[in-house]
Amino acid sequence: MSKPVSVVLLCEDKQLSVFSRRFLKKRGINQIAEIERPPESVGGSRKQWVNREYPRQLEAIRQRSGVALIVCTDADELAVDQRIADLNEACIKSDIEPRKDDEPVAMIVPKWNIETWLAYLRGESFDENKKDNRPSSRYTGCQKECKDQVLKLVEMCYVKQRLNEPVPASLKAACKEYKKLNQERY
């Protein structure tokens, strides 16, 4: 019997957090500690907050056995790889080695926002590369309503082992990232 998995969740916003928590729980991961986001009233960019917090959390999980780190942040105008490169650069600026391929760290990076993924999982049309075409206004504040979409994603990613085409490239990348977190490894 494998030991319970502990996850530290670093999320840019509430919708990413709710979606990720539900996804992890459906995968049997129930020990989830989330880094508290600063209140929106404080101001400042949440993306920059993730950049500041990520190196500290990466360093912290390296000191603990049996813990994974999942970072959830929007790419916005950047490519997903560019957003991950930003996070690596934040580590370098903090004198911390960026994540290694064999570390239990997953980067979950929707292109503009996770609402595009919700539209895809509902079978609606989407274009994750066009800012003006994103469905965010329809799903803003719908954290409680993503349960069905999480179930559908778990079914596609783990049961069927394939996503329905056409799939947002950022979601395909996220499924690969989640799969890196093999529960037996840590």
Image: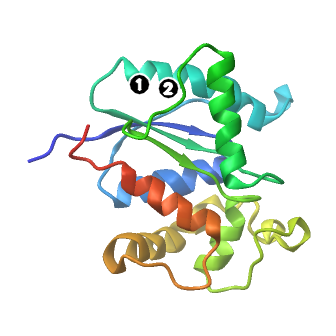
Q: Is residue 51 above or below residue 156?
A: above
Residue placed most toward the observer, 151 or 69: 69
184 relative position to 37: left or right: left
Residue at x 57% of width, y 85% of height: 165
Q: Distance between the residues labelled 2 and 1?
A: 5 Å
- The local secondary structure at tag 1 comes to helix
Residue at x 45% of width, y 19% of height: 60
Q: Do the residues labelled 2 and 1 touch (CB within 8 Å)?
A: yes
Could you tell me if residue 37 is visible in this image? Answer: no
Q: In this view, does 65 lie above or below 75?
A: above
- The local secondary structure at tag 2 comes to helix
- Which x, y percent locates residue 87? 65, 34
What's the amino acid at mark 1?
Answer: Ile
Give the residue furthest to the left: 1
- Dot 2: few (<14), some (14–19), or many (≥20) neighbours within 10 Å? many
41 relative position to 128: left or right: right
Q: In which quarter of the image is the C terminus?
A: top left
Q: Is residue 98 above or below residue 110?
A: above
Residue at x 56% of width, y 52% of height: 18
- Residue 61, disc: 1
- Which x, y percent locates residue 68? 39, 36
Residue at x 39% of width, y 35% of height: 103
User: Residue tagged by mark 2?
Assistant: 58
What's the amino acid at mark 2?
Answer: Leu
- Which x, y percent locates residue 42? 83, 26
Give the residue furthest to the top: 95
Could you tell me if residue 58 is visible in this image? Answer: yes
Give the residue furthest to the right: 132
- Which x, y percent locates residue 183? 26, 47
Residue 160 lies in quadrant = bottom left
Residue 132 lies in quadrant = bottom right
